[in-house]
């Protein structure tokens, strides 16, 4: 099966790998560069927090298990997943109530989480300036270094013969006798047996080019649910190999001693058209919060402060499946795509190569979003705690 995968972020790399492993002849068409989209600017925490309804929670739990299974398979690639857990706490009464309710819900769903005290917290993160409050510890969560995850997925796709055309911007998709004609800017066109659209926050434009517009939340509105600031520090001598999600700051390691920091309250100022400087007020706040949280971070500075733009289907849930009754054009777009990428790529390849629908995707078909310009904007408050 000659298959085009459009987009080389985590979802496209994962689909390319699974299709190539299944014996498909895979060409990836990428407009700018691998990781040029949202996958290159992500907090990259693997989790299933605040994911509702239940089927969406279960999908994310399955996404975490897929990472574990992939990490257990030996591969000629360095470690890209740290399944080292996450520590979370609240600072005020309202936050404590929300956290207790979330922990109770997760416990009811059989999701591993335990309350720990300050001694255990210090054992888990020796440099933590332990807060005087109860801490929730989620042992099965972790984080990914996105470039290394892409190295693993895309590397294995290449080993199985997958090719990259880059730069290659897809401008048109149409079903023709026995295939899908894919047109590129510049005038080139090729017919493939099947196409996977994995274009993240550009999904609305690319699906519209196929005649089936999937509604996405606008990715570039300042202060909206789709935008968020991420700071990348200089290398620091701090002992942190887990994720921290705290009221003032989320932190994860990024390899080489660098940390990724995120202050969700600052996202109200995130504007893709005017990214703040890496040495300005936002950067200073993030660094001050970091030194208040972790020993070993004195003198921290940001090497970059980026505005991430989430890929969000307009109702906030995953979209994965064939488009508009086609059995050749498949679309995948989701927030939490780091958690879900390896799973969604495998399931997409399975549906494309066998023609049999996968039950886990029943609630997430993209056709529910066709032409849905009427959906209300997503509220930042709902998504702030959902990565
Ligand atoms: C601030 C922030 C924090 C996040 N935190 C987390 C988290 O903790 N955990 C988690 O699981 N997820 C998180 N996410 C979400 C996650 O990063 C994304 O869901 C995921 O990276 C999306 O991957 P993708 O492959 O779908 O899209 P992308 O990585 O955006 O890739 C799409 C690719 O398609 C290409 N493309 C677009 N249009 C065309 C075209 N016409 N022709 C050819 N190529 C095209 C682009 O150039 C791009 O390379 C976060 C996101 C943000 C912004």
Image (cartoon, rainbow, N blue to C red):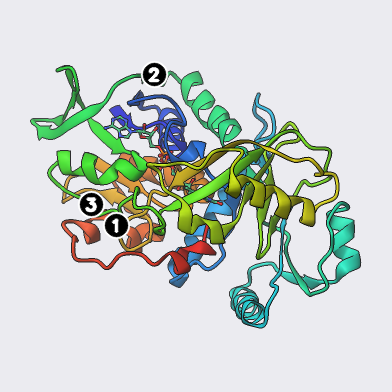
Report if residue 61 is visible in the image: no
Above or below residue 128? Residue 34 is: above
Q: Quadrant of the N terminus?
A: top left
Q: Are marks 2 and 1 in contact (CB under 8 Å)?
A: no
In the picture as drawn, the residue positioned furthest to the front comes out as 281
Question: Which residue, given by chain and number where applicable, does mark 1 sit on?
Answer: 365
Residue name at image x 56 percent, y 45 percent = 230
The answer to whether mark 1 is within 8 Å of ligand 1 is: no
Provide residue 119's location: percent of width, then percent of height: 91, 66
Q: Residue at x 32, y 26 (%)?
A: 31
Query: Which sits earlier in the primary sequence, circle 3 or circle 1?
Result: 3
Badge 2 crowding class, 10 Å Cα cut-off, few under 14, some 14 to 19, many 20 or more, is some
Query: Label for residue 67?
Result: none
Per the image, label 1 sits on a secondary structure element best described as: loop
Give residue 163's mark: 2
Give the CA separation, mark 2 to mark 3.
27 Å
């Amino acid at each position: 099966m000659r298959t085009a995968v459009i987009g080389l972020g985590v979802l496209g790399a994962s689909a390319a790998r699974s299709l190539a492993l299944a014996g498909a002849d895979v060409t990836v068409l990428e407009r700018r560069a691998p990781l040029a989209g949202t996958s290159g600017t992500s907090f990259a925490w693997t989790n299933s927090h605040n994911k509702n309804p239940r089927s969406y929670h279960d999908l994310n739990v399955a996404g975490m298990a897929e990472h574990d299974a992939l990490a257990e398979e030996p591969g000629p690639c360095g470690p890209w997943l740290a399944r080292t857990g996450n520590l979370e706490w609240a600072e005020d009464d309202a936050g404590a109530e929300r956290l207790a309710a979330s922990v109770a819900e997760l416990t009811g769903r059989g999701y591993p989480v335990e309350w720990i005290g300050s001694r255990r917290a210090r054992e888990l993160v020796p440099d933590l300036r332990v807060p005087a409050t109860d801490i929730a510890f989620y042992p099965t969560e972790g984080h990914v270094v996105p470039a290394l995850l892409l190295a693993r997925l895309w590397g294995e796709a290449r080993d199985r013969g997958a090719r990259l055309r880059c730069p290659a911007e897809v401008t048109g998709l149409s079903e023709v006798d026995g295939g899908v004609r894919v047109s590129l800017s510049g005038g080139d066109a090729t017919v493939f047996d099947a196409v996977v659209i994995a274009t993240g926050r550009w999904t609305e434009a690319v699906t519209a080019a196929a005649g089936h517009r999937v509604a996405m939340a606008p990715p570039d509105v300042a202060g909206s649910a789709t935008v968020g600031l991420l700071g990348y520090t200089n290398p620091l001598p701090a002992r942190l190999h887990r994720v921290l999600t705290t009221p003032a700051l989320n932190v994860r390691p990024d390899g080489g001693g660098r940390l990724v920091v995120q202050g969700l309250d600052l996202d109200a100022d995130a504007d893709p058209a005017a990214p703040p400087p890496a040495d300005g007020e936002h950067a200073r706040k993030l660094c001050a919060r970091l030194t208040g949280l972790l020993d070993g971070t004195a003198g921290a500075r940001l090497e970059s402060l980026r505005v991430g733009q989430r890929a969000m289907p307009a109702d906030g849930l995953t979209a994965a499946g064939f488009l508009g009754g086609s059995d050749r054009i498949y679309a995948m777009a989701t927030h939490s795509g780091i958690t879900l990428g390896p799973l969604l790529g495998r399931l997409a390849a399975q549906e494309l190569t066998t023609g049999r629908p996968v039950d886990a995707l029943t609630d997430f078909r993209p056709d529910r979003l066709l032409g849905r310009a009427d959906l209300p904007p997503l509220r930042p408050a709902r998504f702030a705690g959902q990565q």
